[in-house]
Amino acid sequence: MKTQSGALVEKLLTNVSNQLIPEGYISELILPVLNVVQTTGLIGKYSNDHLRIIDTTVGGKGLYPTVNTTVRSSTSYKLTDHALKELLVEDDYDNVEKPYDVEEDSTVALTTHLWLEKEKGLADAVADTGIITNNTTLAGGDQWSAYTTSDPLGDLVAARAAIRGACGMKPNIAFLDEDVADVLRFHPQMLDSLGFKEQRPGGLNDKELSVALKVPDVYVAQAVFNDGVQPAADSIKPVWGKHFWYAVSPKSAARRQQSLGYRVQKAGQKSRQVFKSNPDEPVGSTKIIVKDKYQQLLSNPDCAYLIENAIA
């Protein structure tokens, strides 16, 4: 057995450090941004009455039929403040050396907290079958990780049809966690649908996965969170779980459109603003604040379909 020998070095390496920073956030990609001036207000909504088939035949001296063409309603929104701060005192600066950086470390941690809250908040909302009522749950041999018995193509056809039947439009995006995507990339049905059979050593690439799912945009999430409660050990889990979603979600907010929802935010205000100040006490201290203001509004859940527990 090989052993390592040499002098023990207690000095920290100045260019290396270990920290898990989640990547692959998709919460700010799924919903189009709706910039507003007021922090509360209403979003206009039309009914589907204009899609009803009406006999418009007229003749002779008969009166033209009269209809009410438009039924209007509204959905309310309310922006919510999200913020965290950390107070850095002289001891923090005095006792920290490279590769650590007191202010940078604090900013990264605070920003991660806020962004993960936004990511998990949307993931939990769209995974709630009480909200996304167009859904199905897979189990056992029906889960896509069971390659020989599952039928992802059939499940996906049913999902697309369900969205069109609910909101009148076919989905234009799909979103899922990396683990679910990896299963689909190598599923025999998915490979066969593009003519690859099983002769695809690397699985489907991103473009091919999009073609197989029949949507122009596929958002693959990689963000993870620590589900361990102190003092228990860390428990790293994917934010978006083992599910799959289709949705109707335009690139930008506009009038007279169908959309699962909107990321409502104050006009001209960026996400996760960072502020630094020097409070009067303690002397020599610095206060780091990271804040955000938004609402992830699911204004039309009929524009989404959830396949719960798509993989084991």
Image (cartoon, rainbow, N blue to C red):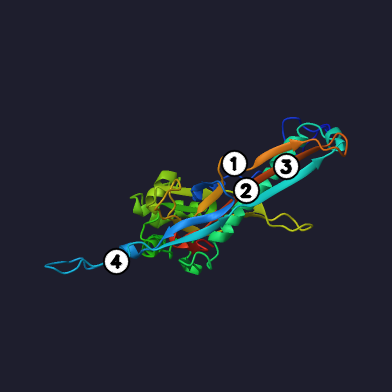
Look at mark 2 in the image and give the residue it sits on.
293
Element type at mark 1: loop
Which quadrant: the N terminus?
top right
Mark pair 4, 3: CA separation:
56 Å
Q: How many marks?
A: 4
Look at mark 1 in the image and give the residue it sits on.
269
Whether residue 246 is situated above or below residue 111 in the rendered picture: below
Mark pair 2, 3: CA separation:
13 Å
Provide residue 54's location: percent of width, then percent of height.
25, 67
Mark pair 4, 1: CA separation:
43 Å
Which disc number belongs to residue 289? 3
- Of pointers 4 and 1, the one earlier in the residue sequence: 4
- Of pointers 3 and 1, the one earlier in the residue sequence: 1
Look at mark 4 in the image and give the residue it sits on.
67
Choose mark 4 or mark 1, whichever is in front.
4
Mark pair 3, 1: CA separation:
16 Å
71 left or right of 137? left
**Along the viewing direction, whichever of 130 and 46 lies nearer the viewer:** 46
The three-letter amino acid code for the residue at tag 4 is Val
Count residues near mark 3 (Cα–Cα under 10 Å), then give few for <14, some for 14-19, many for 20+: many
Mark pair 4, 2: CA separation:
43 Å
- Of pointers 1 and 2, the one earlier in the residue sequence: 1
Decide: marks 4, 1 in contact (CB < 8 A)?
no
Provide residue 56's location: percent of width, then percent of height.
21, 65
